[in-house]
Amino acid sequence: EKEKFREKELESVSSKDMEDYIGFANLPNQVYRKAVKRGFDFTILVVGESGLGKSTLINSLFFTDIYSNEYPGPSQRIKKTVQVETSKVILRENGVNLTLTIVDTPGFGDAVDNSVCWQPVLNYVESKYEDYLHAESRVHRTTIVDTRVHCCLYFISPGHGLKPLDLEFMKKLHDKVNLIPLVAKADTMTPEECNQFKKTVLNEITQSKIRIYEFPDCDDEEENKHQKRIKERIPFAVVGSNVIVEANGKRVRGRKYPWGVVEVENMEHCDFVALRNIMIRTHLQDLKDVTNNIHYENYRCLKLGAVGKSGTTANKNPLAHMEEERKDHENKMKRMEREMEQVFDMKVKEKLNKLRESESELNRRSEQMRKTLDQQKRELYQKWKEFEKERTTFEVTNQDMDDTHRRLTLTLDMS
Ligand code: GTP
């Protein structure tokens, strides 16, 4: 695609225009390269009543990677999800890295009092916005890792319609996150029942003024027609499975019943493929953009709007927060400076002590050598004196002998 784009770009520049060609038409390529190098982050949150197949569906969506990595498929799970569980997986396709985070939440509706069952989910979503806001307003901003929830898959139990709890839950979430409603365990209904149920659910959602994520149209006419057919399937009716079964001589992911096999990836059996395509293949970036430009922006405005109105530390002014951080940083630098000075002083003292020690050692050794030399000098002097004495004695003796010899010679001559 990149090559095609480059060719198109060059074609569009006729030789006459070549002189005026500046080159900013190459900008998309630069953005493309940068984006590919950086990789993509995407976080999916799954929410719904207990036992609706949330974990199974997530496992089915990114089967191989998640199954063989850290995501525990239901067959491997000992018990149901009891707390917010986050699993991360890095998917790689044609050199593009997608860091996918799946947040599985405990199924609700089991407790006697479900009046605040949405709170852990809301807390999670908001805590991620808070983290992002905090990272954005730091004095020293490094690359911010986007852990915000980009998409929330809301599981609806098959039945007569939405339950009051579903409506209440979705109302709590719809202005905080991109909500995609799913009809769970679609294999428990006939196609007619399923279609009827979808219509009822969609009506109830509209009547309750719940805003679900709207998949925008794309520029391509042909693609739009195809996407329209997919959008008509909302709320997506899904079937999950983490086993491979045999159907019509093929090995497929599905659920085997005495009367046949429900194929997860068969568009005639359920909307699983449609959901996966629209969420990952065609609208991933839009889900991220809506999260950033609408939901996060709302959160940010509310937070910043609270500035000044409340003096509590929880709603601290970001500017004051930055000032505080700057002071913290200054104090930290001063502390480091003091520590470095202390270390320097200590090192200088150590060095001086060592120098003093080696100086006294040298003095001691030179004193010892001086003593040895004095001793040797005294001994040599003593020896020299003895030698002198011997020499004098020898000379006297020699002189006597010479005299005697001379006298003898004289006596002999005279005789
Ligand atoms: P909690 O952890 O309690 O929230 O449950 P959950 O929503 O994560 O459900 P889970 O994936 O653990 O599945 C619960 C049961 O439903 C398991 O026995 C699954 O095999 C079964 N199940 C999952 N998906 C489907 C489906 O599409 N159709 C049918 N018929 N059963 C399903």
Image: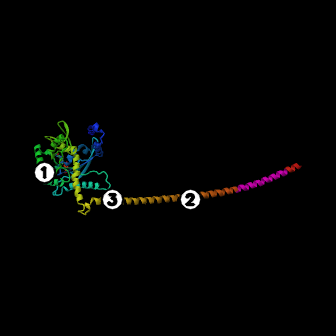
Is the stretch drawn in magenta largely helix, strand or loop? helix
Q: For the point 15% across and 43% down, which residue is it?
A: 228
**Label number found at residue 206:** 1
The nearer-to-camera label among 1 and 2 is 1
**Label number found at residue 326:** 3
Q: CA distance from mark 1 to mark 2?
A: 98 Å
Q: Secondary structure at mark 3?
A: helix
Q: What amino acid does circle 2 point to?
A: Asn
Viewed as shown, does residue 256 lie left or right of 19? left
Viewer-closest of 24 and 375: 24
> How far from the left and from the top, in percent, is residue 30?
29, 44
Residue 83 in view, yes or no: no
**Which image quadrant: the N terminus?**
top left
Q: Which residue is mark 2?
A: 363
Q: For the point 30% across and 51% down, which residue is it?
A: 143
Circle 3 packing at 10 Å, graded few (<14), some (14-19), many (20+), is some
| Label located before the other in sequence (2 or 3) | 3
